[in-house]
Image (tube, helix red, strand yellow):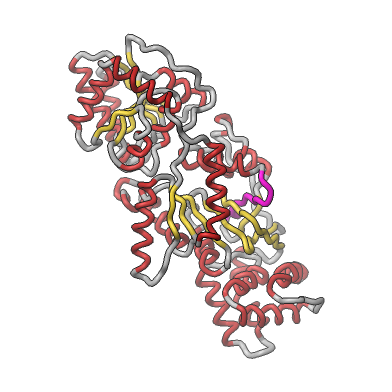
């Protein structure tokens, strides 16, 4: 009861005008009466105060209906009956509340895990720069998940001081029944990454009912557009995430291509009578990896670098096929693939590589490389190849160009956006013979490679510093535009 009173007092300051000291039963009744009469945001806050947990849409609707049906003088009892099952299920009765305004950034996956891909790099690069600002709160979910919480010390370090040495680290956080629920209130909740499975239901209720602004950074719609090429859980998780976006304030996409995809989703919402979020875009920066020195001179034995996780849409199988065609022609070069292992059931690429290695072809595969190793690989490559079928941005294209290394890449979508600044050869990733021809040209034409290197080094691209500043302005000022 003491913790309930503590939570009610924290919430009452925002629910009841001119709140005064009162016994806990009367305070609860007054909060319920005011919340019932004043709207969704206060009911949402009341639910958290009574239960110690964030509600789903269904749970919040149940409380609204209970308050509407309860007779005067019995609203508090109705609220307790409605919220008690949630509190018991999540063991949240002993929690306290910490209401936060300003910017609240949900960085759950990047803070908990050492894993890194383009999404995690974005989250960490931006968070590191935003961490120096006042009025920013970084949060993660409890394990259940029923509450937002502050980061632990190791999670914050993994977020704002990440290095390859932390790539295998996992969060040491353990849920504390006496912990604190961070409650965004009249705040902007920023979503830099797609929530994990099970987290979206409470975020959807927050976006719809809490009165907070929700701004998401949109990386891509690949789990919907290319669902057949992903693990089954990815489309399910992303579909749940879309229930959050339907009530979000804005989606800031990472490219014009991704923005167009998100606008397509917003257009579908109109058929449901929903306005959906505003959609804009900021192209991610092209900045050299730390530790990347000047390019090496062209060597007699060229190395072609392919960076990316091994999954069907990345299309490395087409690159491997093209490489075998050229090896059979007698060209001398090495193909080096760096990146994640990909889905276990995607064996076509692994089988093709194994067959080529048995035939003594110069093809190597390396997983889980460090930033320093990746930087060295870009530096040593004659050019890199990234001919993905479906991409939200294409970070390996940007990293290669920032290193002064030319790129063979896809002739549409976000990779074509990046390539427009120079340093690339574009190709249709669905045309095997065009890939063979482009690969042959880049392997044999030194003048072309010299020209592309010069274009790559002459690019005038965004940096993470300036990008983070512009994103901050977009996220914090989008309320004025809406």
Q: Position of residue 304 (x, y in %)?
A: 33, 21
Q: Is residue 295 above or below residue 225?
A: above
Point out residue 378 in the picture as x, y percentages from the top left corner: 42, 23
Specify whether 121 is left or right of 321.
right
Relative to 211, is 76 on the left or the right?
right
- 139 above or below 319? below
Q: Is residue 183 above or below residue 302?
A: below
- Name the spot of residue 190 as percent of width and height, x first: 55, 53
The quarter holding residue 19 reads bottom right
Q: Quadrant of residue 480?
A: bottom right
Q: Residue furthest top?
A: 300
Q: Residue at x 55, y 42 (%)?
A: 468
- The residues colored magenta run 133-143
The foreground one among 298 and 359 is 298
Q: Could you say where residue 349 lies in the image, as x and y percent from the top left?
A: 29, 32
- Which quadrant of the figure contains the N terminus? bottom right
Picture residue at 64% right of the left edge, 47% below the top: 173
Q: Nearer the viewer, residue 284 or 121?
A: 284
């Amino acid at each position: 009861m003491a913790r309930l009173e503590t939570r009610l007092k924290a919430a009452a300051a925002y629910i009841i005008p001119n709140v005064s000291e009162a016994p806990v039963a009367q305070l609860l009744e007054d909060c319920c009466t005011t919340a019932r009469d004043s709207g969704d945001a206060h009911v949402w806050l009341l639910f958290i105060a009574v239960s110690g947990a964030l509600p789903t849409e269904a749970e919040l609707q149940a409380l609204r209906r209970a308050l509407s049906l309860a007779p005067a003088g019995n609203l508090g009892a109705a609220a307790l009956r409605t919220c008690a099952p949630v509190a018991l299920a999540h063991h949240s009765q002993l929690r306290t509340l910490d209401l936060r305004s300003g910017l609240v950034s949900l960085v759950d996956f990047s803070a908990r895990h050492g894993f890194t891909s383009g999404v995690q790099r974005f989250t960490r690069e931006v968070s590191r720069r935003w961490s120096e600002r006042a009025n920013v709160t970084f949060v993660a979910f409890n394990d259940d998940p029923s509450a937002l919480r502050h980061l632990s010390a190791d999670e914050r370090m993994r977020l704002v001081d990440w290095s390859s040495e932390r790539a295998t680290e996992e969060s040491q956080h353990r849920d504390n029944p006496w912990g604190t629920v961070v409650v965004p209130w009249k705040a902007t909740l920023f979503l830099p990454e797609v929530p994990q499975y099970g987290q979206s239901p409470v975020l959807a209720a927050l976006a719809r009912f809490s009165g907070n602004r929700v701004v998401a950074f949109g990386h891509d719609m690949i789990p919907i557009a290319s669902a057949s090429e992903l693990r089954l859980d990815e489309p399910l998780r992303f579909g749940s995430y879309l229930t959050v976006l339907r009530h979000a304030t804005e989606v800031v996409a990472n490219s014009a291509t991704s923005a167009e995809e998100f606008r397509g989703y917003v257009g579908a919402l109109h058929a449901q009578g929903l306005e959906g979020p505003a959609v804009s875009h900021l192209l991610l920066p092209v900045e050299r990896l730390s530790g990347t020195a000047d390019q090496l001179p062209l060597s007699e034995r060229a190395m072609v670098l392919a960076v990316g996780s091994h999954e069907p849409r990345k299309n490395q199988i087409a690159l491997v096929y093209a490489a075998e065609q050229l090896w059979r022609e007698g060209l001398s070069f090495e193909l080096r693939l760096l990146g994640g292992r990909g889905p276990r059931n995607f064996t076509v690429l692994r089988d093709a590589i194994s067959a080529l290695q048995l035939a003594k072809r110069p093809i190597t595969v390396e997983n889980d490389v460090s930033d320093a190793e990746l930087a060295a690989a870009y530096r040593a490559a004659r050019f890199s190849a990234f001919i993905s079928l479906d991409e939200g941005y294409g970070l390996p294209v940007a990293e290669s160009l920032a290193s002064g290394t030319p790129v063979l890449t896809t002739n549409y979508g976000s990779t074509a956006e990046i390539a427009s600044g120079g340093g690339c050869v574009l190709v249709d990733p669905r045309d095997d013979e065009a890939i063979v021809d482009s690969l042959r040209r880049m392997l044999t034409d030194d003048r072309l490679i010299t020209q592309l290197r010069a274009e790559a080094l002459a690019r005038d691209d965004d940096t993470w510093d300036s990008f983070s500043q512009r994103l901050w302005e977009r996220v914090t000022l989008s309320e004025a535009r809406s």
